[in-house]
Image: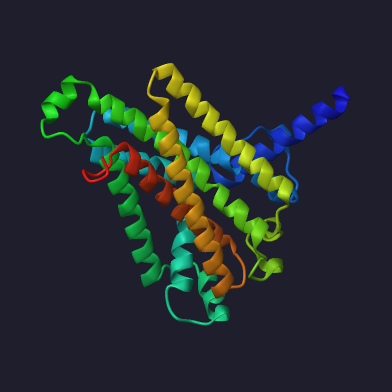
Amino acid sequence: MLKALWQRGLLELRLFFTALQFFTRVPVPAWVGFEPAWLTRCVRHFPLVGGLVGLWGALALGVASLWWPPAVAVVLSMAATVWLTGGFHEDGWADTCDGLGGHVSREKALLIMKDSRLGTYGALGLVLLLLLKFAVLSALLTPAVPDLAQAARGGIHQVLLGWAALGLIWAHAVSRLAPVLLIWALPYAGDADHAKAKPLAMQAGIKDVLGALIAAAVVAVALWLALDHLGWPWRTWLRAMAVASSAAMLVTLWVARWLRQRLGGFTGDTLGASQQLSEAAALLGWLAVIQPVDWVR
């Protein structure tokens, strides 16, 4: 019994490291090893990896905020997460925009997405999405008061930085559910034999989806513990989590419907696109709660 539990725990640890190695630049221990089949099973750990990426971005945001204004800190934070992931998901979003931005056939769209060159639709989509995330994070860090000197004396900047950090971590974590759900709900639309990551072309099982939901819940609990340590209002946090998560899931459902109609399934690039869109939606939901406009207050 104990041996079986140890082996299961060791396997899950290897699957986590596999996901971490695949989606980030973080080196993993040599004893982890690698098996191609693990790429399919490791999807359950995507939200945990996303939470770590978000934590890295939040740390960069906090450190940069010690010396520079919010806009500069946000750019450095975004650069930190892009560096850590190698722009993996951003590349998928750009390729998806190139392939599906114009009115072309399914076969032509799949061919365009395989092209490594960046087209007009991809460039526009990438710039607009990065600008959107920059605007949201900058707004989260900007006090909604006319007297900025008073805000500095009252510690509002530190509070907003904390809320922005929590939102950044959760947006990265919950958005990683999007590709897991697409892999589970849709067939692979491209040529599986020539896929960049062939195991990811295979459909995930319901156990993998449940595992990913549990991983997201682990991140949520960690954020709640941090919130409780700070002594901040949990009702505001709960509302922000609910709105951000709902926004991310609604976008995921829309992407699933869009891909089913246009391609009949998903590709590796569209998985990255789904993560990017869900992340932006989660950040927008978080902003709507933390910094509501006047008519919502």
Residue at (45, 20) in percent of width and height: 228
**Residue occupying the point 87% across, 25% down:** 3
| Foreground of the two, 189 or 85 | 189
Q: Residue at x 70, y 51 (%)?
A: 40
- Residue 13 placed where, x, y %? 70, 33
Q: In the image, residue 288 lies at what x, y percent?
A: 33, 44
Above/below status of 17 relative to 67: below
Where's the C terminus, which quadrant?
top left
- Say if 233 sits above or below 60 in the image: above
Q: Can residue 3 be seen?
A: yes
At horizontal 66% and vertical 66% (from top left) the residue drawn is: 188
The answer to whether 245 appears left or right of 191 in the picture is left
The picture places residue 156, in percent across and down from the top left corner, at 24, 26
Looking at this view, name the residue that lies furthest to the right: 1
Colour scheme in the image? rainbow
Instruction: Specify whether residue 87 is in view.
Output: no
**Image side of residue 115 versus residue 17, left or right:** left
Q: Quadrant for residue 67, please give it.
A: top left
Q: At which x and y percent is residue 224?
A: 49, 26
Relative side of 215 to 34, left or right:
left
Q: In this view, does 78 lie above or below 224?
A: below
The image shows residue 99, relative to residue 72, as above or below, that is below
User: Quarter-wise, where is residue 57 in the image?
Assistant: top left
Q: Of 39 and 230, which appears nearest the observer?
A: 230
Q: In which quarter of the image is the N terminus?
A: top right
| Numbered circles on residues, count | 0
